[in-house]
Amino acid sequence: MIEKALDSYNAGEEKEPVATEVVLPMLGITVEKGKIVEWVKKEGDPVEKGEIIFIVEVEKATTEVESPASGILAKILVPEGVEVPVLTVVGIITEPGEKFSEDAVPQAQSPSSVDSVTMVTSQENASMAADGIDIIKAVPAARRMAREHDIHLRDISGTGPEGLIFARDVETMIARKARPSEVRASTLARRLAEKERVPLDEVTGSGVRDRIMRQDVQAFLKEPETTEMPLGTVIPMSTVRRVIARRMSESAFTAPHIYFFTDACLDPLLDFRSVVLPDLEKRFDIRVSINDFVIKAVALNIMDFPILNAQVNGDEIHIMPEVNVGLAVAMPEGLIVPAIRNADRSGLINIARQRIDLVQRARQGKLTLEEMERGTFTVSSLAQYDITHFTAILNPPQSGILSIGKTDEKLVMEKGQVTVKRVAQIGLSVDHRIIDGAMAADFLQNLKWKLERPSSTFLTV
């Protein structure tokens, strides 16, 4: 299929599209690849523009993709279960009655360089075949970069459809060659290791000078798995953990963080909840948690300080149109942050319902990408642990995150008298590119006021 697509390209010649391309769309600022888990429509089925055509999984979330046009799904280029880069052409839609030609398959696209992904021409293929050389599928930018750095393309595992080599694959090899301590392994061993996600530094090589061969990786895969993690263990990062690591690194090195902390007396809020909870449970069969009150208070506070709902976009600051408060949920592989939609306009019961549903589906791995990407501010609570104070890293591209520690009984001097109060420390981390210290301090002080006066905060909305 790819070979025919390659042969259909003529350098420098523009052609009218003979069909509509179905591409894997951009699914978030950090998403690079997606796996098609289900084709809702099959080859030959009629489709309408805007109708769900396939379902894609990215970073443990699934989302539905709509058809870009009406017509007939003439060809599925990427089958179910295959992971490809975003903007890859995965299917072809033709007009009803239009004859589909395999030679008219549109060229694939790369998320890193859409304009430059012109594939190997038929002339290059013919020349290579005449020389007795196996055809290696690579975009011209990748070939040029490989020549400049004296790298053989057959040593590179392409990340595109059917092994197509992109420029980023060559860049990875260049970086690998620059590291003197890189593990020595054959191309076949590397390809198998990448496919099975095997860390090569854990495999014992049997080749010359301990070079890792394909059979060494196969032997490693047959070793029984163990859940024990003794000292000295090397654990390969899962997909989710790699995403978390990348996002947190981007956050720490892109957005200059500044932190603020204060103590909030939660006696009024805890007492208020104990009074209203029985009636809410009886009327709505919903148990409203302290986190629900916090989410609502944060959303209302953002309405007083809209800059905390902003994001940096190039040289501009965009104040987001919705207040969607994310709640960090602990998972075995790391945190996931689904967001409560329109928390400023939602009542406590609606917030509680959303929170219960999102947390449950998060732990089942059934969240959609939109539910994880729509957050404009995050709340992270460790109140259930014996943690009184912690600093939270921003969840990019958001500009603010609130941290809440456990509630402790503390001796407090009040009007010359020592009294016991239930106190929790709340912290605020903000993007200093957008928010100055005085603004952040005002936000936190105002939030503390809202939490300590629940009747004024929650009975007037």
Image (cartoon, grey):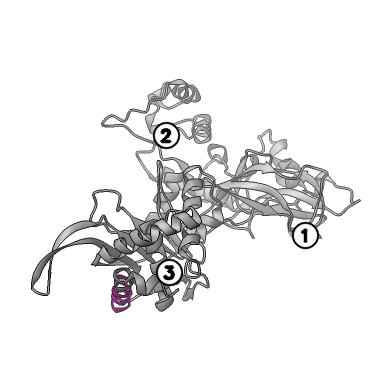
Most foreground residue, 264 or 213 = 264
Amino acid type at circle 1 is Glu
Above-or-below relation of 344 to 233: below
Residue at image coords 47%, 70%: 344
* Residue 231 in the image: above or below residue 268: above
Distance from Cα at disc 1 to Cα at disc 3: 54 Å
Percent x, y for residue 208? 41, 23
Residue 212, horizontal then vertical, whole percent: 43, 27
Q: Which residue is mark 1?
A: 13
- Image coordinates for residue 251, horizontal then vertical, percent: 38, 60
Q: CA distance from mark 1 to mark 2?
A: 44 Å
* Amino acid type, residue under disc 3 in the picture: Ala
Q: Residue at x 72, y 45 (%)?
A: 40
Q: Residue at x 43, y 61 (%)?
A: 396
In the image, 36: left or right of 317? right
Q: Which residue is mark 3?
A: 299
In this rendering, position of residue 380 left or right of residue 345: left
Q: Report helix, strand or loop for mark 1.
A: loop
- Residue to which mark 2 is pinned: 199
Asked whether the viewer can see residue 149, the reply is no
Nearest the eye: 120 or 52:
52
Q: Secondary structure at mark 2?
A: loop
